[in-house]
Amino acid sequence: MVDLGWKTIVVRYGELALKSHRVRRRFEETLIRNIGYALNKKNLVHSIRKEWGRIYVYGSQIREITRVLTKIFGVVSVSPAFEVEANVDVIGEVVVSVLKSFFHVRQGKSFALRVSRTGKHVFTSRDLAVKVGDIVRKELGLAVDLDKPDAEVFVEVRGEKAFVYIEKVKGPGGLPAGTQGKVAALIRSKRDVLAAWFILRRGCSVVALVSEGREMVESLVDGWFLWQHVRVVEEGFDEKFFEPFLNGFVKKYNCDAVVVGDTFEEFRNNVKKGLSLEFSVEVPVLRPLLVFDENEVERRIKVLRL
């Protein structure tokens, strides 16, 4: 049986594929820096390798590294994997070992093999699935069931390497923080923190203005590894002179927009009263929570642990 100590994590990212080659390279480099920064902050020894469309992270503390990666904006999903030679017999041996070690399958149970392939090989994806499936059936006596298998194993072949894994752990997606503009966030409640989370997920950096409740922002920064992308500024201000103060704040920190956590009802009421920030702020005002009702806002705050 092969050694089944996880050593590799496959990192997938999504929206970067839509960018030009130059922009995509810059975004990938930022994502790799963000990953490295977060792992170093947690004192996790690692190395990183990039190929077209994939990032690979290597280390011995796979569970801890995976936990960090799933909190990095720009990461769509990650998979702890076994990296082996792109050879049918080698892949078959690893798949058999995975089924034995992680699923404890026995004769009469079913399995499914999900194969994807990038690059030129002497076999097609179907060839590989059939041949590895034959090895599994011969070694373990399992039946193939592509709809409701008792065990499911993924094989991703890229060039001369193959990656065998059993799960895809979701990340937050979006764009790498620090690839877009700088936005001022008015932090008065957890809703404002949630709004800032959405803006950070779109690749922006944030300057958080707080008069009290600094711990809410620090919770966001610590929980999502955003130390280098969020600046917290504590400043008191007179409500009577809030508009000129905010415009001065935006100019001082070179912000391109302001983000607030207004729901649709709050926004509508403020517009009726002539209190909407659009009437006084010189930059665009972003309200990512407008599309959510009250229950959904509270649910997301709880799920994201803000």
Image (cartoon, rainbow, N blue to C red):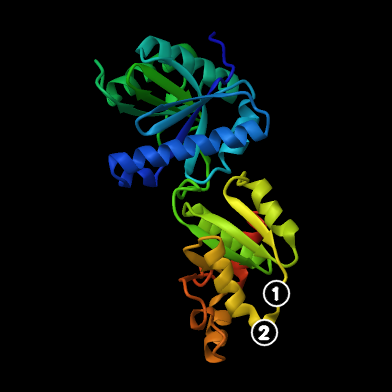
At x 43%, y 24%, the residue is 143
- Percent position (x, y) of residue 194? 60, 61
Distance Cα–Cα, label 2 vs label 1 = 9 Å
**What crowding class fits label 1: few (fewer than 14 Cα within 10 Å), some (14-19), or many (20 or more)?**
few
Q: Is residue 112 above or below residue 199?
A: above
The quadrant holding residue 190 is bottom right
- Percent position (x, y) of residue 63? 63, 30
- Is residue 74 something one can see in this rendering? yes
Considering depth in this image, is 264 or 208 the residue closer to the camera? 208
Q: Amino acid at mark 1?
A: Phe
Q: Amino acid at mark 2?
A: Lys
- Label 1, secondary structure: give it: loop
At x 50%, y 57%, the residue is 182
The quadrant holding residue 46 is top right
Q: Which residue is tagged 2? A: 240
- Percent position (x, y) of residue 280? 52, 81
| 306 relative to 163 in the view: left or right | right
Q: Which residue is tagged 1? A: 237
How many discs appear? 2
Considering depth in this image, is 19 or 296 the residue closer to the camera? 19
Considering depth in this image, is 26 or 46 the residue closer to the camera? 26
Q: Is residue 277 above or below residue 97?
A: below
Screen quadrant of the N terminus: top right
Considering depth in this image, is 184 or 104 the residue closer to the camera? 184
At x 40%, y 44%, the residue is 14
**What crowding class fits label 2: few (fewer than 14 Cα within 10 Å), some (14-19), or many (20 or more)?**
few
| 121 relative to 164 in the view: left or right | left
